[in-house]
Amino acid sequence: MVQQEYRFIRRKERLAVYPGSFDPVTNGHIDIIERSLKFIDKLIVSVTHHPTKKPLFSFKERMEMLQGVFRDRKEIVIEYFDGLLVDYLEKKGVFLVIRGLRAVSDFDYEFQMVLTNRRMLPRIETIFLTPKEEYLYLSSSAVKEIARLNGPVERFVPEIVAEKLREKHRS
Ligand code: ADP
């Protein structure tokens, strides 16, 4: 009897936010996005600014690249926010955050962010995911440097992004 009734209970959608600069999105970010979708239903990829990094691409360009990469994927929503992550999360009513953890070098910064954000908004939980080994040392900064030197960026980013990088360095 109980088993039959389960069919009528609508399971709540599990939502999470993946914030980052995505300047530009790389195969490492994509790996983290796909991994998170194994246990959440909808991921909001939120483009924001980094307090110290000067971006190569505008908000609009970064969002357009992400939208191009995830076209036709209803479970992935691309947004942007300016300001504090905690304010953005509260406004959206989403309290689960996804972040990627590569080598030890990410740890200090990420740990500090989690604890600071938690102090401001105790409801937040952050899940750290580690990418496939080949992406462990991949970063947007490395990709930008390779592009600047006319290297083979297509190994590290989707074609839409590779094209945008080539365009940037042509102009
Ligand atoms: P931010 O400037 O906020 O760190 P990034 O776009 O550089 O934004 O990164 C967003 C998140 O994705 C961070 O948690 C970062 O550690 C993670 N990330 C970036 N590149 C990779 C990668 N190659 N593999 C796994 N996680 C990554």
Image (cartoon, grey):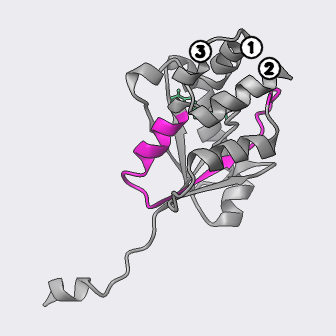
x, y (%) of residue 150?
69, 11
In which quadrant of the rendered view does residue 147 lie? top right
Q: Is mark 3 within 8 Å of ligand 1?
A: no
Query: Quick one: which residue is furthest to the left in this view?
Result: 1
Q: Decide which of 117, 144 is in the foreground and name it.
A: 144
Q: Amino acid at mark 1?
A: Arg
x, y (%) of residue 71?
57, 53
Above or below — where is 128 with respect to 83? above
Q: Amino acid at mark 3?
A: Pro
Above or below — where is 59 with respect to 12? above
- The residues bearing labels 3 and 1 have C-alpha atoms spaced at a distance of 10 Å
Q: Is mark 2 within 8 Å of ligand 1?
A: no
Above or below — where is 44 with respect to 3? above
Residue that numbered label 2 is attached to = 169
Which region shows up in magenta?
A: 29-56
**Do the residues bearing badges 2 and 1 touch, measured as CB atoms within 8 Å?**
yes
Name the N-terminal-most of marks 2 and 3. Answer: 3
**Do the residues bearing badges 2 and 3 touch, measured as CB atoms within 8 Å?**
no
- The residues bearing labels 2 and 1 have C-alpha atoms spaced at a distance of 6 Å
Residue that numbered label 3 is attached to = 152
Q: Residue at x 52, y 21 (%)?
A: 155
Name the N-terminal-most of marks 2 and 1. Answer: 1
How many other residues sit within 10 Å of disc 2, few (<14), some (14-19) or many (≥20)?
A: few
Q: Residue at x 43, y 30 (%)?
A: 131
**Do the residues bearing badges 3 and 1 touch, measured as CB atoms within 8 Å?**
no
